[in-house]
Image: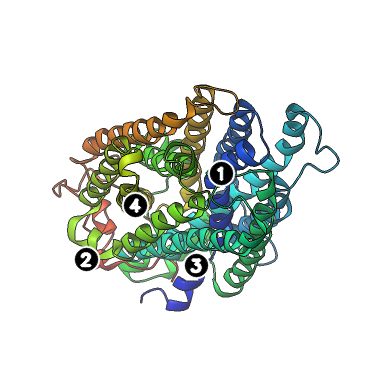
Amino acid sequence: MGLPLTQRLGFSIGHVLNDLTASVWFSYLIVYFHQVMNFNNNLAGYLMLIGQVSDALFTPFIGYESDRSRGFCGLGRRKSWHLIGTISVACSYPFLFNDCIGCSNAPDWSKFIYFAPFVVIFQFGWAATQISHLSLIPDLTSEENERVELNGLRYAFTVLSNLAVFGIFWLLFILHGSHDNNMDATELTSVDGLKFRNLVFIIVGMGIAFSIVFHCVVREPVQQDDSSAAESINGYSTSIEKSTVLRSKMMWSCWLKTMQFYQVAMVYMCTRLFVNVSQIYLPLYVTETLELPKDSVAIFPLIVYVSGFVASVGMRPVNSLLGRKATYALGLMFGIGACVWIYFLNDNNAKQVYGAVVLLGLGGSTMLVTSLAMTSDLIANNVESGAFVYGAMSFTDKLSNGIAVVLIQHMHPCISCCPSCKGYYRLVLTFVPGSVALVAFVALLTLIPYKIGRRTNNDKSDDSSKGDNSTTEEETRPLLGANSAHTTDIQQ
């Protein structure tokens, strides 16, 4: 029996608060501190680094604890951490896009000290929500196509959340346009700070509402411990039930000895780096390099996510038709094509940026959804350590993003702004995402001969041919009984 529609839809909105806040964090943190607060470029980069490193350090710990904990108040282990994360994000995030309380005229270094703790709390909450939500996917279903669908629905709401952010921000520019005598300027100023504050309060309120619905609708399956599993073996008579209970255990130390763990992590890290760096520097590229009106900081990210939403809708049939690896390669082609196109854009053909950002959205969406599906395939039925896997993947993602942003900020040709800035962000959007896309392609090539999710140490008796992972996860490990290939939902 498949996962009920209410559970699928309820799950899909559980990450909306994270999606809304992450959209503003990656799209506008640098441009807000750079143009609105006139912050030192290096300090703005360090603020991003603190957040990314904090997230990177928190995620493996949260993943490990989420796998071990039993939850509280009857919520289950995943939903308990989700609730903790939601509260942390809601209580800390609004402070990041508001004036420094009591220190508005202080030097940049003292403001940096003021904002840093809120960044750390926000990133802890964000990591707790992300890891617990991703870990629910293999807990809710063992059916491969349903996992792809859950990843697709999850990303569809990620895209819708980003659309909401950019759409609301664009409306704020329009509503404040009659009071803004500098609407056609290419850069934001301190006058635009009110737009950011209103945007943040709106999205946090929306995210809390969606989180409440998620907790009311989604039922987390009860996970059996080893003793109860042993009792269940004697109590069940069918091979289907026995094979579910007797799946091979994978503790966190086992994953560190698995080559595919590192291969998939490299693909996931490069995907996130491609998407996040593009998201961070696109607003600066369109305002400082192409010198388009400042409301472009809302319009062009909106276009990216509209095209991304179109791509996410078709993820399940495309994955079923082409398989994970071919679908990911298709996303790489779109992404690299966008980077090349951006490199050749200048003032004379600036309108072509619309086509480039459409490709950027198609490529990023395809790569991200497929890489998440690869991670689910890697976990397969080993849900007992699923949170650790997602935490480890997120560790590589956050750490690499933080380092990349700091290096980009340090290589900036000037402290605040100068004529040399004009071409800098064109180079950033071309060579950074383009380079990591090539690295992802090399990592993908190493996965081609193997089936994602195969446990070579537990599956020596299985001589089935290697290839793309379009077949079901039951084929990756031996199961008991003649009917074991029909094992479906682990929550039953």
Q: Quadrant of residue 173?
A: bottom right
Mark 2 crowdedness (10 Å alpha carbons): few <14, some 14-19, many ≥20: few
In this view, which residue lies farthest toward the right?
102
Q: Residues within 10 Å of mark 3 (few under 14, many from 20)?
A: many
Horizontal placement of 245 versus 189: left or right?
A: left
Q: Which residue is mark 2?
A: 482
- The amino acid marked with disc number 1 is Tyr
Residue at image mark 3: 11
Q: CA distance from mark 3 to mark 2?
A: 34 Å
- Residue kind at label 3, given as amino acid type: Phe
**In 3D space, how far apart are the residues under numbered discs 4 and 2 (Cα atoms)?**
55 Å
Looking at the image, residue 83 lies above or below residue 386: below
Tag 1 residue: 64
Furthest residue toward front: 181
Could you classify mark 1 by the number of other residues whose Cα lies within 10 Å: few (under 14), some (14-19), or many (20 or more)?
Answer: many
> Mark 1 against mark 4, which lies toward the viewer?
4
Q: Quadrant of the N terminus?
A: bottom left
Q: Nearer the viewer, mark 1 or mark 2?
A: 1
Asked whether the residues under the numbered discs 3 and 2 touch, taking CB atoms below 8 Å apart as contact, a structural biologist would say no
Q: Name the quadrant containing residue 206.
A: bottom right
Q: Secondary structure at mark 2?
A: loop
Q: Earlier in the sequence, mark 3 or mark 2?
A: 3
Circle nearer the viewer, 3 or 4: 4
* Image coords of residue 248 (percent x, y): 38, 50
Q: Is residue 83 visible to the viewer in this orientation of the structure?
A: no
* Residue 260 horizontal side relative to residue 75, left or right: left
Question: Helix, strand or loop at disc 4?
Answer: helix
Q: Nearer the viewer, residue 384 or 422?
A: 422
Q: Nearer the viewer, mark 3 or mark 2?
A: 3
Looking at marks 4 and 2 on the same chain, the residue that comes earlier in the sequence is marked by 4
